Amino acid sequence: MFIIAIKMKAKATVNINISSDKHLLSILKALKPETKKLGNRSKVNINKDGSFIILTVEAKDTVALRATLNTYLRWIGSAIETLEVIADK
């Protein structure tokens, strides 16, 4: 059996303020399973700190870091927009 350790060279942490605790928890619940998927170029951690979503991405290189950040930020943005539309009705 081989164990391959990937050295993560790039890291970013993004704090996103979500005004509604209900929306924040909904976003966390939706995205948490995605962070469990094993990738060979990056890993993601998403947590709550008060009214903030804390998104931490570690990646093998800056290209993987950018791609992973873009994906999660788009997902979070889409979730926020969707929750706001639903709340308006």
Image (cartoon, grey):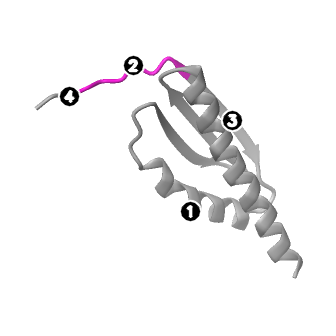
CA separation, marks 3 and 4?
A: 30 Å
Give the side of residue 66 with respect to residue 59, left or right: right
Which residue matches tag 1? Answer: 29
Q: Dot 4: what SS? A: loop
Which amino acid does the dot numbered 2 rest on?
A: Lys
Residue 6 lies in the magenta-colored region: yes
Q: Nearer the viewer, mark 3 or mark 2?
A: 2
Q: Is residue 7 magenta?
A: yes
- Cβ atoms at labels 4 and 2 below 8 Å apart: no
**Identity of the residue drawn at 45% across and 30% down:** 41
Label 1 neighbour load within 10 Å: few <14, some 14-19, many 20+ = few
Q: Which residue is mark 3?
A: 14
Q: Residue at x 57, y 24 (%)?
A: 11
Mark with earlier residue (1, 3): 3
7 is higher (above) or lower (below) than 69: above
Q: Main secondary structure of the magenta part?
A: loop
Q: Split into 4 quadrants, where in the image is the C terminus?
A: bottom right
In this rendered view, identify the residue nearer to me: 19 or 36: 36
Dot 2: element? loop
* Nearer the camera: disc 2 or disc 1: 2
The stretch of residues the image draws in magenta is 4-10
- Identify the residue under disc 4: 3
Residue to which mark 2 is pinned: 7
Q: Taking 1 as reference, is 51 above or below it?
A: below
Q: Are marks 4 and 1 in contact (CB under 8 Å)?
A: no
Q: CA distance from mark 2 to mark 1?
A: 28 Å
Mark closest to the chain's N terminus, 3 or 2: 2
